[in-house]
Image (cartoon, rainbow, N blue to C red):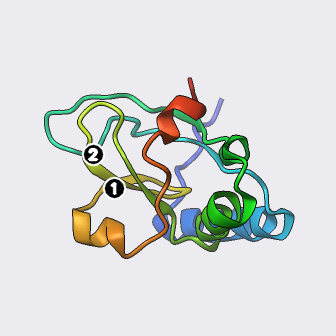
Amino acid sequence: MAKQAALNPTEVKNLDRIYREGGLAQRASPHVHYHDSTCPHPGCGHKMEWIDFQFELFGDADGIYKPLVKSWWEGTGFAGRCPQCDGWIRFTTLQMEAINEDEAMSMARMPEEWHTVAQFG
């Protein structure tokens, strides 16, 4: 059986763009699988491989759900604190990225208790 070649970064970004366009059109609730699932803050080690954010459970469509869903599918992502180390993370469809407080304050942010509503796998 022939081994398939991995996609190059340009192909991955193209496929991600198509995926996000469909999600934005549907205003779908964000959920994600991260291959690199460890919190991006050095020394943390908290695993977040599968996340179903479930923003609809906060009951604030205009204040929480709509802005976060829009930011997610437009590709900007949103900020939230790691449930273990409390460091700020930018969550996108492609990756988790450690960010600082100033960066977090300049983008859409999840509620502090986001991890109590989200489902992890």
Q: Which amino acid does the dot numbered 2 rest on?
A: Pro
Task: Say which residue appears at 57% left-offset and 37% top-offset.
Answer: 3
- Which quarter of the rendering shows the C terminus? top right
Residue 113: x and y, percent? 47, 39
Decide if residue 13 is on the left or right side of residue 85: right
Q: In this orientation, which residue lies closer to the viewer: 10 or 71?
A: 71
For disc 1, the neighbor class at 10 Å (few under 14, some 14 to 19, many from 20) is: some
Would you identify the image quadrant in which residue 45 lies?
Answer: top left
Label 2: state its secondary structure: loop
Task: Say which residue appears at 71% left-offset and 66% top-offset.
Answer: 62
The residue beneath circle 1 is: 97
Q: Earlier in the sequence, mark 1 or mark 2?
A: 2
Q: Are marks 1 and 2 in contact (CB under 8 Å)?
A: yes
Task: Say which residue appears at 70% left-offset and 55% top-offset.
Answer: 60
Residue 76: x and y, percent? 51, 71
Q: In this orientation, which residue lies closer to the viewer: 81 or 41?
A: 81
Decide if residue 67 is on the left or right side of residue 42: right
Spatial CA span between label 1 and label 2? 6 Å
Q: Which amino acid does the dot numbered 1 rest on?
A: Glu
Residue 28: x and y, percent? 78, 55
Is residue 25 positioned above or below 38 on the image?
below
Task: Say which residue appears at 83% left-offset and 70% top-offset.
Answer: 25
The numbered disc on residue 40 is: 2
Q: In this orientation, which residue lies closer to the viewer: 22 or 12?
A: 22
- Which quarter of the rendering shows the N terminus? top right
Would you identify the image quadrant in which residue 118 lies?
Answer: top right
For disc 2, the neighbor class at 10 Å (few under 14, some 14 to 19, many from 20) is: many
Would you identify the image quadrant in which residue 17 lies?
Answer: bottom right
Residue extending farthest left: 43
Label 1: state its secondary structure: strand
